[in-house]
Image: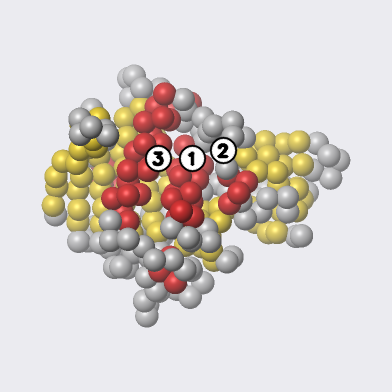
Amino acid sequence: MRDFIIARNDKVGRIQSYWHAYYFAQLPSTQQFLLNHPPTISPIVCRAGAQTAGIGQRNAVWHSPEGQLYFSIRYPFSLPSALQLGLAQITALTIAEFLAANHCPIKLKWPNDLFIENRKCGGILIDLIPRAAGCDAVIGVGLNIVRQADCPAHYAYLADYCRLAGDFYEQLLDKLFAMLTLWQQKPYLPAAHRWADYDFFIHKICRLENEPQAFRLLGIDQKGRLIAKDEQQHIHFFTNTRIQQCIS
């Protein structure tokens, strides 16, 4: 294990913020490590070279061999958990915009998956820990970087599509912390957010989990809710479902 302090400086070199960072060659789960960590007044980052018990959405197992990117951020917010709706979507969008700037053909699948050519290449997990004043968000990120012999064939790997700089991880952290700083002040997506630019299912007719009818998907609103139109042209907003199947 290594632990250290990382500082973010402004354009003239003044320290804007700092966070505590951990690195483990192997760890059961970066997400669980930060969920168990004592609360602090500053953000905490935990990265692992490999995970032996990686956690996906709904407690699914996340395949976590060496060579990929696994990290979690524990970030203290002054506002309560109820106001953090949309955090998963703004995190996914920030990562997508960063990857697209590196010429990666990235797409998003609501609520928080990253895809390339119909294959998943990453995902995001959000846990919220209530506090007396506000909450701590634990944001887990897993990205497939390099294809290896024991990697599942149904996943996509970023290195097959774009060249990543040596400081890729540090650059990505800077983007995420800049986003989180703004989210602290305004916990909703900007009115002109660009989710639709990366939405894999925009304007497609899909079936949703636990819904008897199909919907045409119209993107997301400023709180990250899925916007969908039914066969009677009624508009619905979803927060707790999954896209199961694309019909057309």
- Tag nearer the camera, 3 or 2: 2
- Tag nearer the camera, 1 or 3: 1
Q: Which residue is mark 2?
A: 193
Q: Residue at x 62, y 55 (%)?
A: 200
Residue 9 against residue 24 in the figure, above or below: above
In the rendering, at what x and y percent does residue 98 appear? 43, 50
Disc 2 is placed on an element classified as: loop
Residue 130 in view here:
no
Q: Which residue is mark 3?
A: 127
- From the image, which quarter does the N terminus lie in? bottom left
Q: What type is the residue that disc 3 sits on?
A: Asp
How far apart are labels 1 and 3 at the CA level?
15 Å
Q: Residue at x 39, y 27 (%)?
A: 184
- Image quadrant in which you'd find residue 68: bottom left
Q: Earlier in the sequence, mark 3 or mark 2?
A: 3
Q: Residue at x 32, y 56 (%)?
A: 168
Q: What type is the residue that disc 2 sits on?
A: His
Q: Earlier in the sequence, mark 1 or mark 2?
A: 1
